[in-house]
Amino acid sequence: MRGLTLEIKEGDFVAVMGPSGSGKSTAVNMIGCLDIPSKGKIYLDGEDISLMTESDLAQIRGKKIGFVFQQFNLIPTLTALENVALPMVFQGYEKEERIKRASDLLKLVGLEERMNHRPTELSGGQQQRVAIARALSNDPQILLADEPTGNLDQKTGKEIMNLLFDLHREGKTIVMVSHDAKLAEHAKRVELLIDGKIVKSYNGKNHTK
């Protein structure tokens, strides 16, 4: 990052776009409390997270931020239901509540018939839907999606994007990393990152929605 200044408001859908090596993932990792800057400040809900301990950052990640990665990162030995329920264990949910909420979330993403399947028994698109359900398990304020359609074919990628649009319409704040201009332009706002700096900011197709 080189003097990056970025403001994301509650309810935004922001796409961070740029070529490989431009700093997109680094920027989103810092927004998501996975990394802290060597200098500068990052505010989340008015608190400077760059001053927090790793323990405090872990709490914020667990409660306020949901992550969706290009590689899905599902645990292969667990079923879809168990994968979605797992983050709730660390937030102290009772087992019955975990199972009910995980089940409801899998229904939300259209996988009610696949709850007891393991990742190897699911298509790439289905695995990404499980990953999105898992990201929503603790009802986070912010959903961070790093190339969420990168490993999917065009048709399946469009389905995943439609799911993200639906979540945005329901009030979720979404920050999405993408190198695909056609994909990024469907966000509410697009931030173009080159060599660690934002060089252009413009409205996407959803800026009035």
Image (cartoon, rainbow, N blue to C red):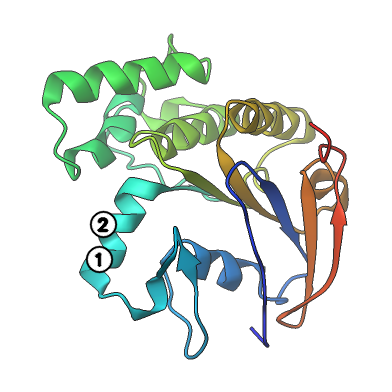
Q: Amino acid at mark 1?
A: Asp
Q: Which residue is mark 1?
A: 56
Give the answer, above or below, for where 106 lies relative to 11.
Answer: above
Q: Which residue is mark 2?
A: 59
Residue that sits furthest to the front in the current view: 46
Locate the N terminus by quadrant: bottom right
Q: Kindly identify the residue that appears in the image at 59 percent across and 29 percent down.
A: 167
Image location (x, y in percent) of residue 61 = 35, 55
Image location (x, y in percent) of residue 47 = 39, 67
Q: Is residue 166 left or right of residue 191?
A: left
Q: Nearer the viewer, residue 19 or 37?
A: 37
Q: Nearer the viewer, residue 67 or 197?
A: 197
Image location (x, y in percent) of residue 51 = 34, 80
Image location (x, y in percent) of residue 53 = 25, 75
Q: Is residue 135 left or right of residue 167?
A: left
**Element under disc 1:** helix
**Element under disc 2:** helix
In the image, which disc is placed on residue 189?
none
Give the answer, above or below, for where 148 lies relative to 190.
Answer: above
Q: Kindly identify the residue that appears in the image at 46 percent across and 37 percent down.
A: 131
Q: Nearer the viewer, residue 110 or 92?
A: 92
Give the answer, above or below, for where 11 lies relative to 177.
Answer: above
Q: Is residue 58 left or right of residue 197?
A: left
Mark 1 closeness class: few <14, some 14–19, many ≥20 residues within 10 Å: few
